[in-house]
Amino acid sequence: MTADLLQQTIWLAAVLFAIGFIGLMVRRNMLFMLLSLELMLNAAALLFICGGAVWGQADGQVMFIIVLTVAGAEVAVGLGLLIQLQRRCKSLDIDRLSKMGETE
Amino acid sequence: MSSDSLLSLLPLICISVTIMILMLQIVLVPGDRLSYWLTVIGVVATLWATFFITPLLPQQATILLTVDAEARLFSQILVICTLLLLPFCHRIPTARGSSAEYLLLLLLTLLGALVLASASHMAALVIGVELISLSLVVMIAYPFAPQYSTALETGIKYLLLSGVASAVLLFGAGLTYIGLGALEFSAISQAFTDIDLMEQGLVLSGLMMVIAAIGFKLSLAPFHLWTADLYQGAPLLSATVLATLAKAAMALALFRFYLAADLAVLQVINLGIALLAILSMLTGNLLALFQRDLRRIMAGSSIAHFGYLMVLLVAISTLHSVEGAAQSRALLAWVIYLVTYLAATLAVFSVMLHIAPASEAFHQTQLKGLCQRHPLSGWVLLLAMLSLAGIPLTAGFIGKFYIFTEAVNGTLWGLLLTLIAASAIGLFYYLKVVLMLISPAEGAEADPVTGRWLTRLPIILIALFIVFVGIYPPSLIDLLSQL
């Protein structure tokens, strides 16, 4: 892997991570917030793949699979809560949930 | 992998087998009573296993886990903490009738904590942290009866925020890996000196991100914004698990990571940690100052106390170059402080669980005259508050004393001044609670005690521990100095 390619990959990962982070802060729809979270985790996974290529080791790919598993577990729990949210508020807007807490 | 190193994983195996048996039991022979006693047997067996493995240590069980004397001691602390929490999990009122899944989640949290206690590789760190935080999310949003109106909101909030922290942790680990080509903790500082400047920048920012992520889980300022809402909004039992077991495991993981990676030699990292310490000590205590809800007070207090612990990390780094003995004393101080803090927090939360397990808020007025109405709960809560404030003759004083000594040894005058100022602020709100407790009760005297004998046991044990260690500190110090 050339130094140029390495640098570009790190930048790509950083930009993906930033997009995910901004998305999580800005969006109020829980589905999109979970998607943004996935984006952040996948940016980290890209870094591991890149590291594995730089050092010619399998460790990076092992970590990639761990990241995927973590992301899967996180989304499984997240979607469970999403369904609860939809049932309770008839909407995916998380701001509505916090308003509900105040009025009760 | 030799049979000895496999055997050294016995505590982890015990808890995993318990989890699998419990899962089968829930499906095949459902019954809350059976699930509960299976869990108790499993946790006791795990505690026995931690003693059983003593002659085998230290062992390197795969590159992921190093089981040494330190890891064994940490595991014992965490397992005992879980054992003390178990009586409160007896017959949890749930909306769906069965509460066996809650026990399952508690065991998964303990499994994550034990993985963290012996982690020596980034992958183990990630797995441990995820096991703890994902189980906690479900525990927070668990359908308790009566339903907590804020539980779902709090659960979603914690899921998203801890998801960000996990992503930051992974991103940091990725950057470190690109720079160093190794994920083992022990390889980090060795390889660091051999690489060029640009790679050093990568590794430093990666390590910073890892520490920030753990700092989020420990709710250090400026990553503390979720703490008060979570302590208050989560069901009381889940908040207790978060405040004691999960936080202790994260603190022990940070400690192991810091030592094994030998971060003490990296000045930039220590500067960052010192900053975290100062911010946490001040914000934590100022946050707690004007709160009326005991749970929010405990949130502020936990931020501040983990700030005090960070002072010790900085002390370790300055003592690093001086001599080995001084450094090992700082290590001892870290463990002693964590144990005394854990005992006091556990006491406060178990008293709350004992007198009002289902209440959503715990207003200070509810505490008024508690010493008169529920003598046991009242006096234990008073003792715990004094211990958190660091008053002599309680366990908390010993911890505080050690931190002051180490900060003086490390000549950290700035941090020491902040520590003194923060402790003085802390004294004010702890004593305000104490005042509430001993003031005479109004109106209805001697309302019926809701707690059962089972939940009284851990409260008495923790109270005895706090008093005994406060009066005769060598008992604890000797026990922990086998490090």
Image (cartoon, coloured by chain):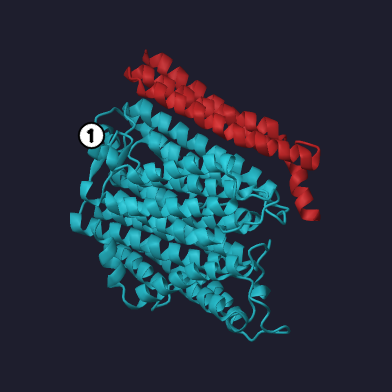
Quadrant the N terminus of chain B occupies: top left
Secondary structure at badge 1 equals loop
Q: Quadrant of residue B138?
A: top right
Looking at the picture, how far across and down is residue B469, in whole percent?
A: 35, 73
List x then y, in percent, for residue B110: 45, 48
Q: Is residue B439 above or below residue B197?
A: below
Front-lying residue, B88 or B65: B88
Counting from the top left corner in percent of width and height, residue B366 is at 67, 74
**Residue B323 appears anywhere in the view:** no
Neighbour tally class for label 1: few under 14, some 14-19, many 20 plus, Cα within 10 Å: few
* Viewer can see residue B450: yes
Residue that mark 1 sits on: B2
Q: Residue at x 40, y 76 (%)?
A: B467
Q: Residue furthest bottom?
A: B440
Task: Report the quarter where the C terminus of chain B lies.
Answer: bottom left
Going 36% across and 48% down the picture, which residue do you hit? B270
Q: Chain of mark 1?
A: B
Q: Which chain is cyan?
A: B
**Colour applied to chain A:** red
Q: Closer to the camera, B7 or B118?
A: B7
Query: Disc count in the image?
Result: 1
User: Identity of the amino acid at label 1?
Assistant: Ser
Q: In terms of depth relative to the viewer, which is nearer, A19 or B121? A: B121
Vertical placement of residue B343 versus A58, above or below = below
Q: Quadrant of residue B438?
A: bottom right
The x and y percentages for residue B395 are 39, 71
Left or right of A33: which side holds A63?
left
